[in-house]
Image (cartoon, rainbow, N blue to C red):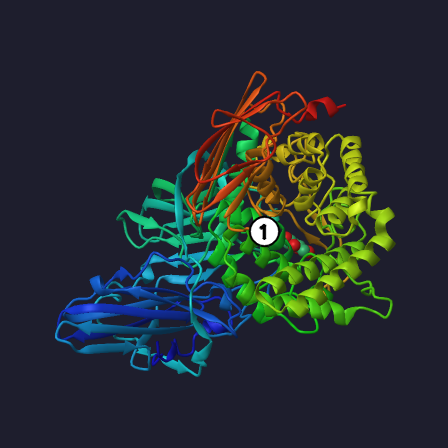
Amino acid sequence: MAWVARVITLPGDPGARHPAPAPLLRRELVLPAEPRQAWLHVTALGLHRVSINGQSVSEDLLAPGWTPYRQRLLHDTYDVTGLLTPGANAIAAALGDGWYRGRLGWSPGNDRANYGDQVALVAQLEVDLVDGSRTVIATDGSWLASTGEICSADLYDGAVVDLRERRAGWDRPGYDAAGWVAAAELPFDHSIIEPRIAPPVRRIAVLPVATAPAAGGRVTLDSGQNLAGFVRLSVRGRRGDTVTVRHAEVLEPDGSLHTRSLRSARATDVYVLADDSEVVLEPPFTFHGFRYAEVETEATVLRAEVVAISSDTPRRGRFECSEPALNRLHENVVWSQRGNFVSVPTDCPQRDERLGWTGDAQAFAPTACTLFDSESFWRSWLRDLDLEQDDRLGVPSVVPDVVLAGEMRYGRAGWADAATIVPWAVYESFGNRDVLEAQLESMRRWVDSLVARRGPDGFLPSSFQFGDWLDPDAPSDRPWEAKADPDYLAHAYFAHSASLLADAESLVGDPARAGRARSLAEDVAGRAWERWAGHAVSNQTGCAAALQLGIAPESERATVGRALAGLVRAADGRVATGFLGTPLVLPALAATGHFDEAFLMLLRREAPSWLYQVEQGATTVWERWDAIRPDGSIHDGRMAPNPVDPEGREGHMLSFNHYAYGAVIDWVYRHVAGIAPDRAEPGYRHVIVAPRPPGGLDWVRASVETVRGRVATEWRVEGDTLEIDVDVPEGSRATVRPPVTERSSVSLDGGWAAGELALSSGRHTVVVTAPAIADPRALRR
Ligand code: BGC
C-alpha cells in the first residue's frame, strides 16, 4: 500500500518533557453512500487505540508493539466496513507513551523518551463505496487534537484516569470540538513502516479473584496466578472518589504486597470517578506483572476480575501426567511464556526492565516453540535482532537495543548467540527454511564478528560475560561469578554458533562457506577442549556445554557423560546450573544415557530445583532458584555493583516470572512424553518417540499441534508392562525407540517387533514388557 497519511500529534504536548495527559485526535467524515469495503491502515509513534463511531477498530492491545522504532515500525490493517455508515462518521484515536516515549530501564528520572519525545498517529482509512467511488481519509493537519481523561499512562508506572475529564461524545460524529486545536504534522520517513507479521497482544484470559481484607480498609485480590495483565473493576461511588490499584507478584509474610522487586516501577493504577453511575475500570496503555492486587477506594467495588494479556500465539503443546507437581511446573512455564511474550520476548513482566534479553530468549526458544505456535513471533523479533546488530560489536544483549551501555551492551556469549540458536530452534520445530534464509546474513555477521575478535593465538580475548548467570553456587549478589569459566563458555558458544552457521549454509547458503564454518567450529572447539577439558568436567554446566555444544571430541563423550552423572549424583540431584547450563544439562545426561541422574534432578523437591519452586507455591518460573527461601522468607534480591556497569550502583534483582529455567520443558516433551522433532527432518516430519518412564510416574499424555497435524503420545506403566499409544499425523512418520532391557519383549500393533520401530501416519500401540525404567530413587542418599 502507498501511505498518504501524515504523522500527526498534539501541538505543544507537555508529554514530551514529563508524564502528561494522553493526546486525543479526531476527524469527522461524510460518506455519500453505503460502504462496500473499508480498510484502516494504522500505526503510531507510541501506542494507539483507534475507534470509529465510538467502537474500537480491534481488540489488539499495546499496538503497534515494540520494534527498533528508528528502523522498523509496524502497521496494522483492519477491516472496518461494519463500523461505518452512510452520512456522518467519526474516527478517533488516543495515544499512549508505551515503549516509544514511556519509561524503559532502571534509571528513574532519566529513562523516558528513548525513541523520541513526541507520540503521533499515522492512519489511513480507505473506503470503497457501493456507488463505485472511493474515499480516502488520512491523518493530516485537518484533524483536531486535545486531551481527555487519561492523565498519564506508563508501562512501568501504570495509568491515572480522571473520569471527570472525559470528553463525552468526542469519538462520535456531531461532537462540539470547541477548544480542540489543529493537529501538528511531524516530518517522517514512511519507508520504515512494515506490516505486522506476529500475532498482536490481546486479552487471553479473564480470571476470577479471591478477596481478603487488608490493612487500612483496603482489599487484597488474589487471582491465583502470576501473570501479565491488569485488574478490571466494576465500581459505584461518588464524583471525586478515587480508586487505587497496586500490584505485586507475592505477599510479604504479614500479608502486605511485596513491591521491592518491582524496583522503581510504580505499577499503580489510579481512577477518579465522575459521578454515581456504575463504571467499569481498566487501565489504558499499561500492564503489570502480578498475582495480587490491593484496591483502596471510598467507592463500592461491585466486581473484580483479572485480565491476562499476551502476544496471542496459538497453543501448541499439552502435557499431563500422574505427578501433579510436574503438571504444575509445565503450567508455570506456559504462564511464564504468556506473561513474557508481550510483543517481544522479555525477561520479566513486572519490574522496571521487561527487556528482550537475548540470553533468556535463546535458552527458552526450543521450549517456546514446543508450547506455542511462536514461529512468526520469533521471526519478527529476529528481524529486529538483525536490524540492531553491529558488524564489529555483534548482537546486542537486549533486542530492541535500548538502555544498556558500555561493555554490557553487545556480544556476550550465550546472549548474542541468539542470532544463530533461535533461528535454528524455530527451523527445527516448524520445519520452514525461510527463517534460515531470512537470518543467514545475520548469523554470518555474528560469527564474522567473533572471528574478527580472535587474537593471533586463535582465542578470543577475555572480556566481561554474563556467563552461567545465576548459577546457584555464585554469590547471590554477584550472579556473574558462576563456577563455569566464562572464557570457556565464550569459546563453547563460539564453536556452537559456527556449527549452526555451517548447518544453515549447507541448507540455504553457500556450500563453500558451509565448509569454512564447519572447520572454524572444529578449530574453536578443539582449542577450547585443549585448554578447558579439565575445567569442563569439574562442573555441571562445563560438562553440559562440552556435550551439547560440540566441544568434547566424540571419543571423550562417554567420559564427560560419566563425569556429569557423577557430579549430579554427588549433589543428590541438586541443580547447579545458571541460565546457560540449565537448558543443556538434562539433554546432556540423556544424550549420554544417564536417565537415572536426569530424573534425579528433574524430580528433586529441595532447593535448588524445579519442583522446589512448585512446592513453594510458584505459579510461574522464578528468576532465582530460591526466590522464596525454605523458611518462607523472600530472597533479599541484593546485587553488588556490576564490574562493567557504567553506573556501578548496588541493585536489586528478584523476579517471580522469568522463563529461562523453564527451558527444561522441551526436555520433558522429548524424554518424558517422548515427542521430539528429528533435527534432520524438522517440523516433526519425522518424529522421534523415545520416552523414558521414571519410577513413580504411572502415565503421561502429551501432544504437539505440528504444521502437519497433531503428534500425540500416551503411555502407562502397569506392573511390568509399558504401553505406548502414538498418533502420527498425515505426512509425518515416526521412529519409536522403546526403552528396553535384556528381558524385554516388544510388540507393535499386536505383532512382535524388535529394535527401532518405524511408524507411518495413524494411531499405533507399542507394548514393552520388562521396560527400562529410570530409577532416580535408587540414587538418593
Ligand atoms: C535480566 C536477565 C538477563 C540478565 C543478564 C537481568 O537483569 O533480568 O534475564 O539475562 O540481566 O545480565
Question: Is residue 706 among the parts visible in the rendering?
Answer: yes
Number of numbered discs visible in the structure rendering: 1
Q: Give the side of residue 238 with respect to residue 229, left or right.
A: left
Residue 471: % across, % down: 73, 45
Q: Quadrant of the C terminus?
A: top right
- Ligand 1, seen in the image, is in the quarter at bottom right
Q: Amino acid at mark 1?
A: Ala
Secondary structure category for the residue under label 1: loop
Q: Residue at x 52, y 58 (%)?
A: 378
Q: Quadrant of residue 212?
A: top left
Q: Nearer the viewer, residue 535 or 70?
A: 535
Can you identify the residue that label 1 sits on? 680
Question: Is residue 174 among the parts visible in the rendering?
Answer: no
Residue 705: % across, % down: 44, 44
Q: Residue at x 74, y 54 (%)?
A: 467
Q: Quadrant of residue 176?
A: bottom left
Placement of 466 over or under 255, stated as above or below: below
Q: Residues within 10 Å of mark 1 (few under 14, many from 20)?
A: few
Residue 644: % across, % down: 76, 63
Placement of 306 over or under 461, stated as above or below: above
Q: Give the side of residue 168 with respect to residue 778, left or right.
A: left
Placement of 8 over or under 569, stated as above or below: below
